[in-house]
Image: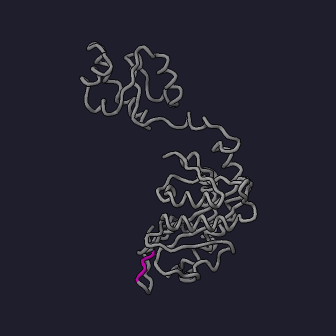
C-alpha cells in the first residue's frame, strides 16, 4: 500500500505500508542528503571518537546540539572524506587520547585503504602524533574491519527502533 | 490526513540525534571484543583470510562422471570441492576469459585431447554454481 503526502515546502514523503503494520521503515523525501559517520574504536573496548561529515559549505554548529559532548563535525560539498578532513580527523583523535600517547608508547591505527588515508602528509602527521597507521588490503573490509563485522548490524536495528519510537 | 497527529518535521538535527543514540547502544564492550576476535586482530592470526577469500576469475571443471548428479545433491560447495579434488587427474583449471574465448583456446591452454570435448556440455550448470 502506497501513500503520498505533500509538505508545504514541496517535500514528497512516500510511505510503504503493509496491512496491520504500525511502524514505518522507509521515508523517502524528494531531496535527500548523505552523511558519513566515522568512529574510532579502541581495543580496550571503548569508543574514542565520533566524527560526522555533513553536506554543505558553511560550518554550522547547531547540527550537533543533540549529540553527546565529544563529537566532532565537518562540512564538505559531497559529504565525503578528503585528505584535508582526514588530517583534522587525526588531530581530533590525538586530542581525545592525549594523556596516554608517549614517544615510547605508540598506538596503532587500522584504517581502510581509501585514497584519502594513504597520502604522505597524513602519514607524516600521524607519525608525529604517535600513531602507526596500518591499511587493510583491498576488498577485505567486510571480514577484517571490526566495525563492519560486529557493530554495523546492531547499529541499524537500534536506529530503526529509535525511529519507531518517534 | 492519517498521520497528521504523528507528524513531525525531519531535520538533520533530529536525525543525527538518533544516529548518536544508536551508536551508543550498538557499540558496546561485547560487540567490540567480538569484532576484534572474529577478525583475528587480537589474538592475531595472520592466516585468517586464507579460507574466506578466493580469486573470482578461476573455476574448476569436472569430467563426464559428474554429469549424472543433480543440483540438489551438491548443496554445499565444500563437499563439491572435495569431490572435485578427488577427481584431480580428470579436472583442470582455466580462467573466465578462456571460457569466453571458446573451446579451442582452452584446448590449447590445457593440452586436452579432442575426445574430452564433450565434457564442456555439463559444465554450464556447474559454472553457475561456482560463481555464487
Q: Residue at x 62, y 53 (%)?
A: A132
Answer with the quarter of the image where residue A91 lies.
bottom right
Front-most of residues B85 and A143: A143
Image spot of residue B49 (x, y percent): 57, 38
Image spot of residue A23 (x, y percent): 58, 68
Left or right: A27 as drawn, with respect to A146? left
Say if residue A82 shows up in the picture: yes
Image spot of residue B6 (x, y percent): 58, 80
Q: Residue at x 52, y 31 (%)?
A: B76
Q: Residue at x 44, y 87 (%)?
A: A8
Classify B59 as above or below A116.
above
Q: Residue at x 52, y 45 (%)?
A: A137
Image spot of residue A99 (x, y percent): 75, 64
Left or right: A72 as drawn, with respect to B90? right
Front-most of residues A31 and A61: A61
Answer with the quarter of the image where residue A107 lies.
bottom right
Classify B7 as above or below A16.
below
Report the quarter where the C terminus of chain A lies: bottom right
Q: Which residues are magenta?
A: A10-14
Amino acid at each position: 500500500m502506497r501513500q503520498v503526502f505533500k509538505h508545504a515546502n514541496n517535500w514528497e514523503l512516500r510511505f510503504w505500508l503493509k496491512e496491520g503494520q504500525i511502524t514505518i521503515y522507509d521515508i523517502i523525501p524528494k531531496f535527500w542528503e548523505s552523511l558519513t559517520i566515522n568512529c574510532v574504536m579502541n581495543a580496550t573496548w571503548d569508543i574514542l571518537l565520533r566524527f560526522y561529515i555533513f553536506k554543505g559549505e558553511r560550518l554550522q554548529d547547531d547540527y550537533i546540539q543533540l549529540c553527546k559532548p565529544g563529537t566532532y563535525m565537518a562540512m564538505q560539498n559531497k559529504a565525503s572524506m578528503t585528505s584535508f578532513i582526514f588530517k583534522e580527523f587525526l588531530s581530533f583523535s590525538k586530542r581525545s587520547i592525549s594523556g596516554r600517547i608517549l614517544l615510547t608508547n605508540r598506538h596503532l591505527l587500522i584504517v581502510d585503504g581509501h585514497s584519502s588515508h594513504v597520502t604522505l602528509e597524513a602519514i607524516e602527521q600521524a607519525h608525529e602524533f604517535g600513531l602507526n597507521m596500518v591499511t587493510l588490503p583491498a576488498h577485505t573490509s567486510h571480514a577484517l574491519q571490526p566495525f563492519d563485522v560486529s557493530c554495523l548490524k546492531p547499529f541499524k536495528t537500534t536506529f530503526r527502533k529509535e525511529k519507531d519510537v518517534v | 490526513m492519517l498521520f497528521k497527529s504523528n507528524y513531525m518535521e525531519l531535520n538533520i538535527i533530529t536525525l543525527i540525534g538518533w544516529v548518536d543514540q544508536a551508536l551508543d547502544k550498538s557499540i558496546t564492550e561485547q560487540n567490540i571484543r567480538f569484532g576484534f576476535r572474529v577478525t583475528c586482530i587480537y589474538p592475531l592470526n595472520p592466516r585468517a583470510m586464507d579460507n574466506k577469500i578466493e580469486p573470482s576469475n578461476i573455476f574448476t571443471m569436472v569430467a563426464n562422471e559428474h554429469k549424472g548428479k543433480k543440483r540438489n545433491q551438491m548443496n554445499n560447495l565444500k563437499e563439491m570441492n572435495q569431490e572435485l579434488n578427488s577427481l584431480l587427474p580428470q579436472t583442470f583449471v582455466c580462467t573466465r576469459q578462456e571460457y569466453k574465448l571458446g573451446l579451442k583456446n582452452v584446448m590449447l591452454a590445457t593440452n586436452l585431447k579432442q575426445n574430452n570435448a564433450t565434457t564442456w556440455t555439463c559444465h554450464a550448470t556447474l559454472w553457475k554454481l561456482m560463481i555464487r
